[in-house]
């Protein structure tokens, strides 16, 4: 497989991100650049704009979803699938997504409405939805 | 003005030579605009694109946004697929501007329904054509449909696509009763699977269309096929292979989708099913001979284009008629 070199790519500049940082005080990229001046307590008190820090899904659920996604997409064992993984970035097309939802319904004994299925973009989205539906059942 | 090469021993040699020694490239060959009722399809086979310098040349055509999206994909194969899809769109559209607008300079935006469309600039002495396009990909083929004035949609699926779930379980969960019955009646598992993929290709596409208008769940519309008998009468049929027309009925509004859209199904490159959908003209329907006309090219941008309509690479299943000559 041909490897495409990144040598001719210009990386997005971070200066814009740093400016926005003033308003919210919290962007995952700028955290690493401003670690020295940002007290860690601030993380919990400031309203978060990035869901990745506020995912409510149980880790068990996330793991099971990752497993089902891996199987459906026949991903190599070393490929990274985490809560933040976007289905489309993993190569899932519409048929894969529907099959994944079917697999989740079977695994968790739930039924997912199509409108809800449409809003699932990441593993975390799926895990959140599953936890909600499972809780409703109980 | 067209200088497309036909496949033959000579062109094979030239391609191999070009593939091995890739420094400069041939310019893109311009193509005449599709006429009314015509859909043009351009497709590329990723496995046949291996040359690194060619891929790097394609990379330069993408916008920085597209490059970022591409690098977010996980793994080389998906990244290459993303690269080729954008390359296919940009180079194809450029041909229809007589190459006046270079592939790199196209800008895109999403319309109200989230569908990508061209954002033309302002040109002093030239009116851009009203081009519409849509791209679809599988890991083994990427296709781009182009029309003028009418919206177009394309969806491709691998013929050999295996689904992990049992076909009938899947169908019962997501398809309409009529479609489940159609599949259930097929005894040969391989034919059943192929019919499933054909149906899915059509349904997934219609659903994508519907998303902008009414987000209809899969079960609320059904795909029916209509055949034209020898006496000219149109009758329902369960066999896709006999059908001349594809109808889509929404249960709460039986006429809505078929009134505005025309559907066709074809087999591409012996390996894929492609569903094509084009906006209908606002005139009275003809008597079933108003098929969408189709022209198909296989391409390796800057290297070789091949007009494949009328060859084995294009087999109409229903709803379309091929233009055999350019």
Image (tube, helix red, strand yellow):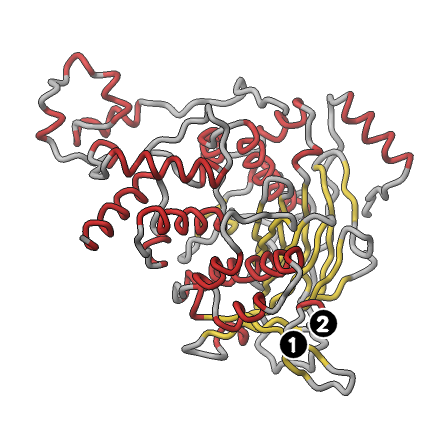
The numbered mark at residue B125 is none
Element at label 1: strand
Residue under the image location 47 percent in, 53 percent down: B115
Residue B38 vs A49, above or below: the answer is below
Tell which subunit mark 2 falls on: B
Q: Quadrant of the C terminus of chain B?
A: bottom right
Residue B300 % position (x, y): 71, 37
Residue B40 vs A20, above or below: the answer is below
Q: Is residue B309 left or right of residue B103?
A: right
Label 1 – label 2 distance at C-alpha: 7 Å
Residue at the spot of label 1 = B237
Q: Tell me whether marks 1 and 2 sit on the same chain.
A: yes
Residue under the image location 48 percent in, 28 percent down: B71
Residue under the image location 60 percent in, 50 percent down: B157
Residue at the spot of label 2 = B242
Element at label 2: helix
Q: Residues within 10 Å of mark 2 (few under 14, many from 20)?
A: some
| Label 1–label 2 contact, CB within 8 A | yes
Q: Is residue B287 left or right of residue B10?
A: left
Q: Residues within 10 Å of mark 1 (few under 14, many from 20)?
A: some
Determine the residue located farthest toward the top in the rendered image. Answer: A36
Determine the residue located farthest toward the front in the rendered image. Answer: B187
Looking at this view, is A65 or A34 the one in front?
A65
């Amino acid at each position: 497989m041909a490897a495409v070199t990144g040598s001719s790519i210009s990386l997005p500049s971070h200066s814009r991100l740093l400016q926005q940082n003033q308003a919210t005080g919290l962007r995952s990229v700028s955290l690493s650049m401003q670690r020295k001046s940002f007290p860690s307590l601030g993380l919990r008190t400031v309203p978060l704009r990035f869901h990745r820090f506020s995912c409510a899904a149980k880790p068990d659920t996330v793991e099971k979803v990752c497993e089902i996604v891996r199987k459906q997409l026949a991903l190599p064992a070393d490929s990274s699938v985490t809560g933040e993984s976007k289905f489309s970035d993993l190569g899932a097309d519409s048929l894969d997504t529907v099959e994944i939802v079917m697999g989740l319904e079977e695994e968790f004994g739930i039924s997912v409405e199509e409108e809800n299925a449409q809003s699932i973009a990441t593993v975390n989205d799926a895990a959140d939805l599953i936890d909600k539906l499972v809780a409703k059942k109980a | 003005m067209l200088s497309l090469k036909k496949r033959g021993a000579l062109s094979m040699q030239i391609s191999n030579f070009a593939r091995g020694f890739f420094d400069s490239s041939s310019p893109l060959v311009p193509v005449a605009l599709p006429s009314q009722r015509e859909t043009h399809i351009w497709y590329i086979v990723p496995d046949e694109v291996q040359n690194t310098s060619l891929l790097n040349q394609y990379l330069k055509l993408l916008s920085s946004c597209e490059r970022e999206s591409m690098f977010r994909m996980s793994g080389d194969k998906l990244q290459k697929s993303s690269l080729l899809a954008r390359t296919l769109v940009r180079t194809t559209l450029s041909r229809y501007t007589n190459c006046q607008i270079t592939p790199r300079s196209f800008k895109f935006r999403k319309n109200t329904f989230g569908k990508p469309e061209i954002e033309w600039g302002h040109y002093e002495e030239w009116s851009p054509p009203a081009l519409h396009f849509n791209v679809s990909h599988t890991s083994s083929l990427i296709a781009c449909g182009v029309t003028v004035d009418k919206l177009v949609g394309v969806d491709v699926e691998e013929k050999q696509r295996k689904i992990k779930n049992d076909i009938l379980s899947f169908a019962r969960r997501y398809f309409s009763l009529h479609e489940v019955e159609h599949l259930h009646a097929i005894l040969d598992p391989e034919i059943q699977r192929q019919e499933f993929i054909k149906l899915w290709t059509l349904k997934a596409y219609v659903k994508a269309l519907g998303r902008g208008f009414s987000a209809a769940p899969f079960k609320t519309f059904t795909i029916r096929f209509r055949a034209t008998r020898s006496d000219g009468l149109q009758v329902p049929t369960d066999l896709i292979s006999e059908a001349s027309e594809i109808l889509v009925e929404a249960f709460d509004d039986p006429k809505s989708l078929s009134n505005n859209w025309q559907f066709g199904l074809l087999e591409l490159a012996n390996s894929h099913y492609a569903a094509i959908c084009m906006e209908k003209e606002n005139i009275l329907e003809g008597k079933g001979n108003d098929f969408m006309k189709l022209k198909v090219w296989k391409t390796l941008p800057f290297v070789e284009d091949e007009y494949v309509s009328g060859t084995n690479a294009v087999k109409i299943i229903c709803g379309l008629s091929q233009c055999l000559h350019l």
